[in-house]
Structure formats: C-alpha cells, structure tokens
Amino acid sequence: MSVLAESLWTTLICFTIVFLVLIVLIFIMKFQHYVIEKINSIGAKKKPSQATAVETAQTTYNAEEDEELVAVITAAIAAALGRPASSLVVKSIKMVDTANPSWADAGRREQIDSRF
Amino acid sequence: MDMVVNTFVQLYKDSGFINITYKQVIMIAIACVLLFLAIVKEYEPLLLLPIAFGMLLVNLPGSNIMAPPQYVVDPATGLAVLDELGRPVVKQIGGLFWYLYQGVELDIYPPLIFLGVGAMTDFGPLLANPSSLLLGAAAQLGVFTTFIGARLLNFTNQQASAIGIIGGADGPTAIYLASKLAPELIGPIAVAAYSYMALVPIIQPPIMRALTTPEERKIRMGSIRTVSKKEKIIFPIVVTILVVLILPSVAPLLGCLMLGNLFRESGVVDRLSDTAQNALINIITIFLGLTVGATANAEVFIQPQTLMIIALGLFAFSLSTVGGVLLGKLMCKITKGKINPLIGSAGVSAVPMAARVSQVVGQQEDPGNFLLMHAMGPNVAGVIGTAVAAGVFLAMFGPK
C-alpha cells in the first residue's frame, strides 16, 4: 500500500475512534445528568409534606388576634433593645416582605426555635 | 611573567569564545528572540521563558549542562564496571539538566502538569452542554491531516504522530507523545507547540472570520444551566474509568487530569488542590521548560527537518481551528442558529486562550455578546480530545 493510502486509512481510523470515544462521553454525561435529576426529583417529592406543614402554620399565625401580635412584637423589640416595653409606642405593624419564599420563613423560624 | 601570560592563554583556550560554532550562535540568537517574545510581548511567558533560557544555556559551549554521566569502562570487555551493589561506577557525573531531563524522558512531568491543569479546570460549561465535546473532537482535524502530510514528507509513523499532535495546541500532550514515540524530535516539537499556543490570538481570528458570516458571529447563545456539585464530582471518576478502559495508554495523562479535577471539585482536599494548581505545577513547569529548551542543541535543532516540523505544526494548528469552526457551523445549522460557530475554534486545547479568542472575535461583531463560558466547553473538551488522540496514536504506534 502506498504511503498516502496507508496514512489516509490511519487518519480515518484514528479520527473515528476519537469521535466515538467523545460521543460515548456525551452519552455518559447526559445519562449522569438524567440520573442525578431523577434522584433529586425523588428527594423533592418527599419534601412537600414539610412545606404544607409550614404553610398551615403560617395561616394560623396570620389568623391570630392582632392585639396579641402587637404585644408579642412590642415585647420582642423591648427585649432586643433592652428597654422596658412601656417606653415603646408601636404605631404600626407592616409585613415588610410578602415575597419571602416559604422555605426562607421556615428556615428563619427554625433558627429562632433553636435559640429558645 | 610567562606564568601570567600562560594562565590567560589557557583561560582563553578553555573559554566558549574559541569553541563556539556558527550553529550555536544561531541558536543563541533564537533563544534571545524567544526571551524577547516571552518578556516584552508576554507570549506564554511561564513556559517560553524557561524554554528559551534552557536553549540558551545548552548552546553555550563547554557548559555540558545536558551531558549524560560517564561511567568507568573495563577496557578488556568494553562494559561498564559495576560496584559491589551492581551499579555502574561513575567516572564523571552528568550535567544538571540531564538529571532533570529524566522527568521528561520517563514521562513524569507531563502528567504532573495535567494534575495541576485538572485542578484549575472547571468542567461545568462542558457538563452544561455535553455536545461541545464534538467540537473538541472536530478540532483534532489538524492533528490527523498533518499526520498524512508528515508521512508524505518521509517522517516515520511515530514521528508523524508526534508532529501532528502539535495541532492539538496542548504542550504537555505533545511532549508526552514525542518522548514516547519520537524522542529525537522532542526539542523542535515542544518549541513549535508552545510557540503556536502563544500565537493563538494571532493565528486563529483570520481563519475564524474567513469561515463565518457576520450574522453567524452575532449569534447570542443565552445562559448555560447551573451544574450541580454532584455532577462535577462524578464526572472525573466516570471519565477516568471509561476512557482508561477504552484506551489504557492514556491513563497517566487523563488519570492525572481527572485526579486534579477531583481534588478541586470534591471540596475535601483543598490543600492538595491548592498545591497541585500552584506550587507543584510551577515547580514542574520550571523543570519541564528548562529541560525541553535544553534538548534544542544546535546540532539537533539546526536541520531542515526542524523547519519542516515548524511548518507542519502551523498547518496542523490552522487546520484544527478550521475543523472546529466548520463543525460549529454545522451545529449552528442543525440547531437552527442556537450555536455560534465561533466557539468551535476553542476546540483546540490552549486553555483558556482559545476560549478568550472566541469571546474577543464575537465581541468585535456584537459588543454585548458573551461567548466565553460557552467557548470554555469546547476548550476543555479539546484537552480531553487531544489526550484521546494521543492515546490512539500510542495504541497504534507505541512500543508494544
């Protein structure tokens, strides 16, 4: 076989092997992504029960008496500032960030609970 | 008085001035040009500077810095005399660089460089868009076509493979393959590979512009998905198992690349990751650069075949760029304009220089276009592609 024909064959074989190996890698990567997504989605399905619990808690929390809420918030501010509650006047209470994701609220509540 | 004169005469006779050849003068001039490019133009200075200085030192007559050790020979048998432990008795120890060069000859340095490269590489963009691996494969076009060219110029299969791999624009892989298949050509191949890696921003843009339309260059590619930590950790392990099973000869290179990456992504061995991507790679770069430069001694380097290798290297490198961009165009057509063909040129593995070139050329057409992260996918794919190409050559032409 002439040098040209021989080297053309070699090139063709080598180039094909490189492509094949990398194509196999592409499938591996896609498969890996698919498997991890699946595992994550199974994990996510388990979590909603917790989320519902948080939501229910929040609803009850919102439905509480306003006066009680004012008293609690005043007491919290007084404790945080280290001053008697009688020296504070609560003029208004507004929900600052209604767009808070429920998981953030849940996390915050967990943090607070762990301290008391 | 005579003694003083004699001393000076002897000093003059021992000095390099009287022993220097015109070839060595040429090599010293080339070394100085490379030093200029490294220091003033800042072309890949981390490698070009030690390479150029190694080249300079080895071509100064009488330095014997690359001389192998000499052993005591038994005049009767002509064999080396052995000591009581069975080791040959040394008459004169070798030059400093000769000992350091054993790391190249025994293929120790290139995989260690890859360990550091792995620790510095983020495979995230590749994992986010696995099809960019195809661009990394297409950019090996130059490697294989140059193989044909070199064969036609009467290089052996082994030499042609080592010359072709310059097209991958991956210095450590080129040195690794050359030291395994064609150690006699390691000097010119390393100098060509690193010079072209340094010249990526000059060589690639005209080819990229010639092969693409302004509309194609303006294509915006949107954002890439976030890749989870789990994926990044599993990837190096899976790739190592799979590719080494297919091509065992590539184990040292790819294994070290992936080990370095696992250091980085696992997050539990930050100290090792830090050492691999800083201290270790710097030390090895010094040894590798100096000793590879030192292989370029005048007698070996100033030959017609060096010019041929440098010309073939340029051809290989340009064709690899062409291969990447053409497949990029094809993928652009198939995806109905979702892929910017400019990222194809990043399939040559000069990381991250080639990806930066894609970004710059894209921004010249549309300043608001950000291709860098998209180009990093083919860029790291190119590293894997070149390593696989080297593995295929080794499997076909390597020592059995």
Image (spheres, rainbow, N blue to C red):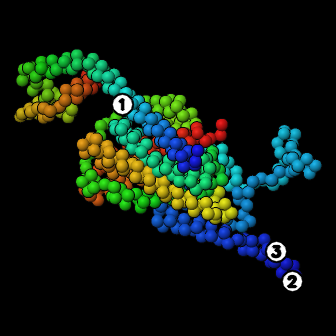
Residue B106 x/y as whole percent: 66, 44
Look at mark 2 in the image and give the residue it sits on. Answer: B1
Residue matched to label 1: A30
B196 or B28, nearer to the observer: B196
How far, Cα to Cα, is label 1 from label 2? 85 Å
What separation in Å lies between label 3 and label 2 (alpha carbons)? 14 Å
Q: Is residue A9 visible?
A: yes
Q: Are marks 3 and 2 on the same chain?
A: yes
Tag nearer the camera, 3 or 1: 1
In the rendered structure, the answer to whether residue B254 lies left or right of residue B205 reads right
* Residue B54 visible in rendering: no
| Cβ atoms under marks 1 and 2 closer than 8 Å | no
Residues at marks 1 and 2, common chain?
no
| Picture disc at residue A96 | none
Quarter of the picture containing the C terminus of chain B is top right
- Judge from the rendering whether residue B159 lies leftward or rightward of residue A72; answer left or right: right
Identify the element where label 3 is drawn: helix
Q: Residue furthest right?
A: B76
Give the class, few, some or many, for how many residues have Cα within 10 Å of label 1's Cα (few <14, many ≥20).
some
Q: Are marks 3 and 1 in contact (CB under 8 Å)?
A: no
In this figure, which residue is indicated by the disc labeled 3? B10
Dot 2, crowdedness within 10 Å: few (<14), some or many (≥20)?
few
The N terminus of chain B lies in quadrant: bottom right
Residue under disc 3 on the same chain as residue under disc 1 = no
Label 2, secondary structure: give it: loop
Q: Give the mark, 3 or 2, whose residue is nearer the N terminus.
A: 2
Number of marks: 3
| Residue B275 rendering spot, x and y as whole percentages | 53, 43
Disc 2 marks a residue whose amino acid type is Met
Looking at the picture, which amino acid does disc 1 mark?
Lys
